[in-house]
Image (cartoon, helix red, strand yellow):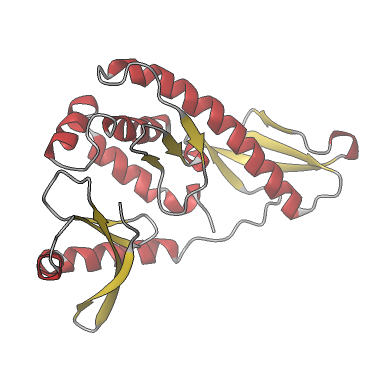
Amino acid sequence: MSDATLRSLRYGDELIAFSLRVQPARTAKRIAIHVEPDGRVRVDVPQETSDAAVQAALQRRVRWISSQVAAVRERLAHAVPRAHVSGESLLYLGRRYVLEVVVDESRDGHVRLRGTRIEVAVADGDASRVRTLLDTWYRKRAGEVLAARLAALAPLLHWVGTPPPMQLRIMQTRWGSCSPAGRLTLNPNLVKAPRECIDYVLIHELCHLGEHNHGPRFHRLLETLMPQWRSVKARLDGLVEQLMPP
């Protein structure tokens, strides 16, 4: 796959930036247009696709692209950066918990789930320290939860069987990816989402082990394994600013 190049599309007085990715291994001949959860527009094309074909495809969907980008901007405009102080709301597996910061030098660095609270013990109450500890806790939980769900789902797909290798990496625009070699890269922030959303992302990436593009066969696989995937994806997209806060 080649590196993405940045281009722009005009819609009335609006100039919409998009990244164009040429995918030599793409078997589907259609042009795929994606509006990412953070509002970025990505266009994936097969090799040797002409600029005229790209522009024609974008013009056919420019109204939809503009409305999707506007909806994301509206949603993210209300996202408030976290202060990492007691009383804030945190998500874990789709449930809301209250952050409780406990100043206790003897337990500095301890994070635990207690009923409806996530308790973080620190020596001095420093917000940056609280954030670091929470990030570490979420990452550890993500490794456990995602590995367990992957082990449960992989045998259901006859072309997978054994769970593929998995790694965690914070990504700003993606929940997961599947390399040509079959390694899954998953966003640890996914552990904050409801279990159904976690399963959707895992099934989506596992389907790529059988079909490496987003063509009709890929969507047939996804539809068979999770008929309600569109509504689950919409639910996940609607939680982006809470799951991946600024």
Q: Can residue 190 be seen in this view?
A: yes
Direction from residue 203 to residue 58 in the image, left or right: left
Return the residue nearer the eye: 137 or 121: 137
Most distant residue in the bottom direction: 13
Q: Position of residue 186 (x, y in %)?
A: 45, 38
Q: Which residue is drawn at 27% across and 19% down?
A: 157
Position of residue 205 measured from the top left corner of the image (x, y, whole percent): 33, 35
The residue furthest right is 106
Left or right relative to 121: residue 12: left
Q: Is residue 86 visible?
A: no
Relative placement, left or right, of 181 versus 13 is right
Give the residue displayed 30% in from the left and 51% down from the top: 1
- Quadrant position of residue 80: bottom right
Number of numbered markers:
0
Drawn side of residue 153 relative to residue 109, left or right: left
194 shown above or below 162: below
* 41 w.r.t. 235: above or below: below
| 81 over 153 or under it: above or below | below
The one of 120 and 187 positioned closer to us in this rendering: 187
Residue visible at 43% across and 51% down in the picture: 240
The image quarter containing residue 226 is: top left
Q: Where is residue 207 in the image (x, y as percent from the top left)?
A: 27, 31
x, y (%) of residue 14?
26, 80
Residue at the spot 31% in from the left edge and 63% down from the top edge? 71
Name the image quarter holding the C terminus: bottom right
Q: Is residue 235 above or below residue 85?
A: above
Closer to us: 72 or 100? 72
Residue nearer the viewer, 118 or 163: 163
